[in-house]
Amino acid sequence: MPTILYVLALPIVAGGIIARYLFLKIAHPIIWSPISLLPGPITATFWGSNLPALFDSKRSWKVHEIFLEKYGRTLRVFGLAKFDQRILTMDPMAIGYILQRSQTYQKPWQSRAFISSIIGESLFSAEGTKHRCQRRIADQAFGERNLQSFLPIMFTKSSQLAEKWIASTQGAEEGEATIETAMWVQRLSLDIIAEVGLGVNLDCVKDDSNKIHKTYMEMFGVLLKKQNPLLTFLGICIPKLQPYIPTDMFMTLRRCKATVYDFGMKLIDEKRRLLAQREKCKHRDFLTLFLKANCHPDVPQDQRMSDEELLDIVNTLLSGGSETTALAITWTLHYLSLHPEVQERLREELCTVQTYSPSQVCGDDEILALFESIDSLPYLDAVIKESLRLSPSIHSTIRVAMVDDEIPLSESMVMRDGKVENVLRVKQGQWIHLPLEAVNIDKTIWGDDAWEFKPERWEALPKEVSRLPGAYSHMLSFSAGPRVCIGMRFAHMEMKIVLHQLISCLKFKPKARIIKGTLTFSKPYVEEDWKNGRPSSLPLDVSRYLPDEAACI
């Protein structure tokens, strides 16, 4: 008899658990959501979502503008369905408050799990003590003095790419060649970060068959392909299940990570051997600094990074460190190709500073002086800022409230019941979208021409721009707060050196209609390629620029 009762009770208990889950996760958020009175758009169906419109590059700017005009700077949007109510805020004060409190507002575990499935758990996805420990060492690695020691690498690699493209134009009909610039710039950035970050020369610009470059191309390429949404979501939520989920994405990511980690482990073992042999190792690459700090006597054994964490750092440096800077350079080339008058004015300024040639024998002081001359060019600075404003590598970010809180607002909210609120009250677990790109092109802040590429605007910015909390010229392109992009200065230096080498000696014209595709990063795509799921690219018509007075390679 007891056995029969147990059998009968099991479905009742299971049904009760399922009913409770459905009530708490679906019914309760719809009926009693603490943000249900926030202004915001509605959806036609229960499964309706605002996310596609917010992320679709063709609609995103206009949708954010309409939402701002209709609902104000802070509103409610629907995520996966009506039970998934989220906050979207374009309020500068609220964004600054959230980003400055990285412990109170963290990345959702789902986002961290997704990032970790690609590049492992490191600076991009770690939280708490682990992130602070890694960040402390990384701050030393990305210090100005250490970065200056890598200037010769940046100049040498940039000149190699310029020579490569010049050779392509010389062999082309009428001296104009079509070059897939995005791929080559990505190789260049991978070369630079590999030598600066890991102390290894991959030589991707010269070696078309480089294994590591091909691995990352495959890794990021698979993210573009359509996947089974249920299996993908399951694998992201429960990473330990990924080896048993037979989807193309997870199988490719596992294979690619294994290749990178095999490469990384050999590199780590070699560096450990060198560190053990020398009392004072002069290597200043980032990985060596991490290894030195990790084995320092003052670091307790239980706080030292494991081999797995060190391998995640290798993966992060190679992927994130190359991809974001490469995209920034690529988008700048795109905008310059569309605006020949800006390109010409920039070239005139750049040609006042001699380009670097590998045949030159330069000491550290001469290299530093050359960079400082480039760094001081005002129009180059304006062009880079304008490109990063319109096309930051990261379209937006998400944070989740770890505790109940009240977020200050610069503009009041008119709630759905007519009440006016001057603070945003959030409950623990609330998701908040921070649309970084939308704030960068907000016409009420930047002016009516905010959607246009106009480097001249940086000569006299609207006063409203000073309200923005961004770490880089008030913009949010590198985020803000304790988790601001640690490679901001490094990216800035690389961009200036690469653009100086290329624009001084080459001219660029558009070849195809390019649109912005937003997935993991915001990338340029030939329109037809985006529709058909093909990889990101930026083909440009490139020709040599050689006036008598130019000091080119």
Image (spheres, rainbow, N blue to C red):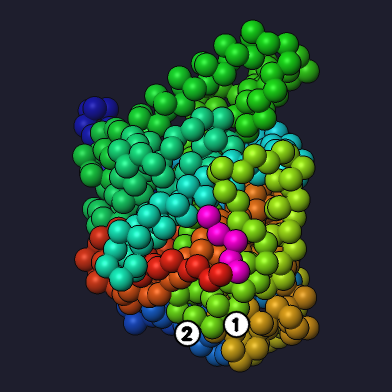
Q: Which residue is depicted at the point 72% across and 71% down?
A: 378
Q: Between 9 and 304, which is closer to the camera in this rendering?
A: 304
Q: Main secondary structure of the magenta part?
A: loop
Q: Say which residue label 1 marks.
A: 454
Numbered range of the magenta stretch: 549-553
Front of the two marks 1 and 2: 1
Say whether residue 551 is magenta: yes
At 48% from the left edge and 68% from the top edge, which residue is drawn? 545
The image quarter in which residue 2 lies: top left
Which residue is depicted at the point 60% across and 69% down?
Answer: 549
Dot 2 crowding, Cα within 10 Å, few <14, some 14–19, many 20+: some
Q: Which residue is mark 2?
A: 62
Q: Quadrant of the N terminus?
A: top left
Q: Residues within 10 Å of mark 1 (few under 14, many from 20)?
A: some
Q: Quadrant of residue 477?
A: bottom right
**Is residue 468 in sight in this rendering?**
yes
Q: Position of residue 497 (x, y in %)?
A: 61, 55
